[in-house]
Amino acid sequence: MTRAKAAAGTATDVSPANSCERDASVKAPPRERLLDAAAELFARQGVNVSTDALCRAAGISKRSMYQFFSSKDEIIATSLARQVPAIIAFLIPDADEAASPREQMMYVFHRLEDIAPNPDFYGCPFLSTMVELKDSDHPASVIALRQKNELTAFFRREAARGGASDPTLLARQLSLVYDGAVARVGAGIEQLDGLSLVTAAALIDAAGIPAQTT
C-alpha cells in the first residue's frame, strides 16, 4: 500500500478537543484532568482563557492547580508539549526506504486533508500558540517552534533524497503551504477539498522531483 493510499484511510483524530476531552464523571488524576481541560479550552478559545475556566473544566480548585503548576504559563507549555508525540506520529510518516520522497512529503498533506473536515479540528496548536503569545522566549513558543522546525526538517530531508533542485527552498514552501492551509481550516475559511494536495504536488513538480510511476 502506498503512503497516499494509507493516508486516505480513516484518520486518527488528534484534535485536542477530541483526544483530550473526557467526561467529568471519569475521575482521572487531577493533574491529567487539568492538562486535558487546557488542551481542549486552548484549542477552542485560545491560550488567554482564564484560570477560573480551566479549573472549572477540570473540576479542581485553584489551590490544587498551583500545587501542580507554578503558573498558567507552565500549564500552556506542558499542555503543548504533551500533544507533540501524538501530532508528530499522526502527521509525519515513519522512515521507509520503500516509499519515495514524493510519497513521504505528500503523506503530510493527505493527513491534513483527512482531518480538515472534522468539526473538532481547530487548526495547529503550535502555530496558534505562537501567534497568540507573540513572545518567542515563552516556553510554549519554544516548544511550538521546535515542532514547526521538525516538520520543515522532515520536508528538507525528503526533498534532498528526491533530488530537489533546492531542498531548503522546497521545505520552506511546503511548510508555508501546510501552515497556511491549517490556519485557514482552523479559522473556518477552508475545508481544503484537496487544495493542499494540488498545491504541494505543484511545488514538488517545480523542484524537479518526478511524479510516481507506480
Image (cartoon, helix red, strand yellow):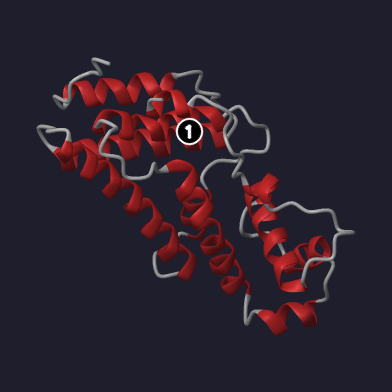
Image quadrant in which you'd find residue 188:
top right
What is the secondary structure assignment of the residue under circle 1? helix
Residue at (64%, 31%) from the top-left corner? Answer: 118
Residue 72: % across, % down: 63, 72
**Left or right: 58 in relation to 91:** right
Residue 35: % across, % down: 67, 65
Residue 112: % across, % down: 48, 33
Vertical placement of residue 161 versus 32, above or below: above
List the single residue furthest toward the right. 25
Residue at (27%, 20%) from the top-left corner? Answer: 202
Q: How many marks?
A: 1
Quadrant of the rendering where the C terminus is positioned: top left
Vertical placement of residue 78 versus 186, above or below: below
**Left or right: 187 in relation to 200:** right
Residue indicated by mark 1: 111
Residue at (20%, 37%) from the top-left corner? Answer: 159
Image quadrant in which you'd find residue 206:
top left
| Label 1 packing within 10 angstroms: few (<14), some (14-19), many (20+) | many
Residue at (62%, 78%) from the top-left corner? Answer: 71
**Left or right: 27 in relation to 106:** right
User: Is residue 129 shown to the viewer in this render?
Assistant: no
Vertical placement of residue 37 versus 63, above or below: above
User: Is residue 81 shown to the viewer in this render?
Assistant: yes
Residue 78: % across, % down: 56, 68
Most foreground residue, 164 or 48: 164
Amino acid on which disc 1 is placed: Arg
Quadrant of the rendering where the N terminus is positioned: top left
